[in-house]
Structure formats: structure tokens, C-alpha cells
């Protein structure tokens, strides 16, 4: 328990410090997490006898995609350069053609899945650091990113507490037997309260937008947890890794982020 508490504290402190100071430290932090996540993902799926992803190529392509999207958000390079990682993604098919492995399309699918599942959400989250008052700008602010992380953690905490003390009706027993509807509603309520508090101090978004983001976090953050549980069940593993003692791996800690960020980004993009 002590190890879990210390790890959790250091993890939260690292995330907050990384996104608070400036955009370059934030980019470096997210890129590091992406690299660790890709390594963990490909390492997990390689344990299956039927799946042999292109680990090196997938990691290199994912890193290139993340770097270019972040530099484009910083307005250092043109978004046109995105054609480079796009071509690298499609080159995956050609590399697999010459590998002569069994289940080639399964290998390609899992390789590309790792890039989409891990890289795109973190690139989108970084870009949200340049969103303010219904527009993307060139000025970085930690407000939306920090608010997102705190709401994600709040949702997890609220769901755990409400589920533990009030939970009776199973939410998705086939995938995660411990999750309940009561826990989900408890997490959502606490997250909306957090969003209301953020609106008083963080001015990059208006109250109604904070509330919408809170609802998206509550819905898709919880579903992201279930999706990651589905992946682990498919691969017959308990934790995605052990890089965070007492907390599992990168995929375990950011499961809610992978699914919720694309919906939050899409919402803010559509209203801009």
C-alpha cells in the first residue's frame, strides 16, 4: 500500500509539473509517455503466438507521428509534413510483405493499432494546450490539459468510492465484474462538480464547455477503462506492465485518456 501511495504521488506530481511549466516540457513528457506506451503495447501483443507486430517500425513511426504533430501545434513546422508519418504507416504493409510471417494482416493491424490508440490521443491532448475561448491559438496554457487530468482522476476516484459503498448493479460484467452503474454515476457527479470549480479559476473555457468535457470524461473515460480491460482479457494478462509499482503499466494508467481525449478534442474543434 505504501509503495502504491508513493508511486501515485510521484506520478501525479510528474504529470502536473510536466504540463505546468511550458509547452516544450509538456511535449517532452507526452512524447516519453508515448514511447513507453508503444514499447509496452507491442511487448504485450508479441506474447501471443499468433501476433508478431513490427515493434521497431511501429515505435519509430509512432514517435515520428507524435513529434511532427507536436511541432505543427507549436507552429514550428507546417502540417503538410504529416505526409511523412502517413507514408511510414502505409509502408508497414510493404515491410510485412517481405517478413514472411504468419498472419501478416494481423501483424500489420496490431502495429497500426498501437500508433492510433496511443499516439493520436496524446498528440490531441498536447494540441488542446493551445485552445482558448473557442479557438486554437499559438499561445500555450496548461489549463485545459491540467483540468482534463484532474477530472479524469476525479472520475476514477468517484467511481471507485461510489461503487465500493453503493454499487449493486453491474455495468459491464463480461469485461469488468467489479464496475457498477452506481460507481459510474458517482464518478460523473464528482467530475461535474470538479468542472464547476475549474470554471471559476480556469478561464480558457466557459462553464458549459467545462461541463460538457466533464460528461465526456465520465462517459468515455469509463469506456476507455473497459476497452483496455477487453485488450488485457484478449491477451490473457492482468496488468499491462509494471513500470509504475502498485499501479501497473502505462496502458493501465492512461486507459481512460486514450478514448476520452479524441471525443473532447472533436467537441472543442467543432465549436471553434
Image (spheres, rainbow, N blue to C red):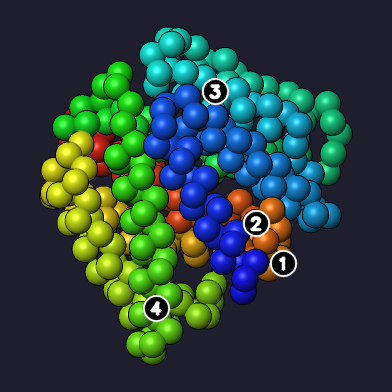
Distance between the alpha carbons at the discs numbered 2 and 3:
25 Å
Marks 2 and 1, the one that precedes in the sequence:
1
For marks 3 and 4, give the one nearer the viewer: 4
Image quarter for residue 262? top left
Say the numbered circle drawn on residue 108.
none
Q: Residue 251 versus residue 196: which sits nearer the camera?
A: 196
Kindly indicate whether the residue at mark 1 contacts the one at mark 2 (C-beta within 8 angstroms).
no
Distance between the alpha carbons at the discs numbered 2 and 1:
20 Å
Q: Give the answer, above or below, for where 139 lies relative to 199.
A: above
Where does the N terminus fall, quadrant-wise? bottom right
Q: Give the answer, above or below, for where 70 lies relative to 3.
A: above
Residue beneath label 4, please? Answer: 161
Q: Residue 126 versus residue 229: which sits nearer the camera?
A: 126
Q: Give the answer, above or below, for where 207 lies relative to 83.
A: below
Q: Secondary structure at mark 3?
A: helix
Q: Name which residue lies at 41% across and 28% down.
A: 22
Marks 2 and 3, the one that precedes in the sequence:
3
Image quarter for residue 252? bottom right
Q: Residue 256 versus residue 108: which sits nearer the camera?
A: 256
Kindly indicate whether the residue at mark 3 contacts the one at mark 2 (C-beta within 8 angstroms).
no
Q: Secondary structure at mark 2?
A: loop
Q: Residue 144 versus residue 267: which sits nearer the camera?
A: 144
Q: Name which residue lies at 36% across and 45% down.
A: 146
For marks 1 and 3, give the one nearer the viewer: 3
Residue beneath label 3, please? Answer: 67
Q: Give the answer, above or below, for where 224 lies relative to 27.
A: below
Q: Secondary structure at mark 1?
A: loop
Say the numbered circle drawn on residue 244.
2
Image quarter for residue 80? top left
Say the numbered circle drawn on residue 236.
1
Amino acid at each position: 500500500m505504501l509503495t502504491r501511495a508513493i508511486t501515485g504521488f510521484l506520478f501525479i506530481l510528474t504529470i502536473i509539473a510536466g504540463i505546468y511549466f511550458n509547452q516544450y516540457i509538456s511535449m517532452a513528457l507526452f512524447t516519453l509517455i508515448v514511447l513507453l506506451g508503444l514499447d509496452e503495447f507491442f511487448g504485450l501483443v508479441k506474447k501471443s503466438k499468433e501476433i508478431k507486430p513490427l515493434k521497431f517500425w511501429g515505435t519509430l513511426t509512432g514517435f515520428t507521428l507524435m513529434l511532427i504533430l507536436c511541432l505543427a501545434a507549436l507552429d514550428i513546422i507546417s502540417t503538410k509534413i504529416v505526409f511523412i508519418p502517413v507514408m511510414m504507416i502505409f509502408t508497414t504493409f510493404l515491410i510485412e510483405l517481405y517478413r514472411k510471417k504468419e498472419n501478416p494482416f494481423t501483424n500489420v493491424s496490431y502495429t497500426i493499432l498501437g500508433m492510433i490508440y496511443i499516439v493520436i490521443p496524446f498528440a490531441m491532448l498536447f494540441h488542446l494546450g493551445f485552445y482558448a475561448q473557442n479557438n486554437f491559438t499559438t499561445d500555450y496554457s496548461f489549463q485545459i490539459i491540467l483540468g482534463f487530468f484532474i477530472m479524469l482522476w476525479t472520475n476514477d476516484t468517484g467511481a471507485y468510492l461510489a461503487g465500493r459503498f453503493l454499487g449493486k448493479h453491474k455495468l459491464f460484467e463480461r469485461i469488468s465484474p467489479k464496475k457498477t452503474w452506481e460507481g459510474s454515476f458517482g464518478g460523473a457527479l464528482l467530475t461535474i462538480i470538479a468542472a464547476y470549480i475549474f470554471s471559476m479559476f480556469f478561464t480558457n473555457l466557459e462553464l458549459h464547455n467545462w461541463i460538457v468535457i466533464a460528461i465526456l470524461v465520465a462517459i468515455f473515460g469509463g469506456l476507455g477503462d473497459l476497452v483496455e480491460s477487453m485488450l488485457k482479457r484478449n491477451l490473457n494478462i492482468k496488468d499491462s506492465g509494471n513500470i509504475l509499482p502498485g499501479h501497473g503499466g502505462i496502458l493501465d494508467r492512461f486507459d481512460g485518456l486514450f478514448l476520452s481525449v479524441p471525443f473532447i478534442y472533436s467537441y472543442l474543434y467543432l465549436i471553434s
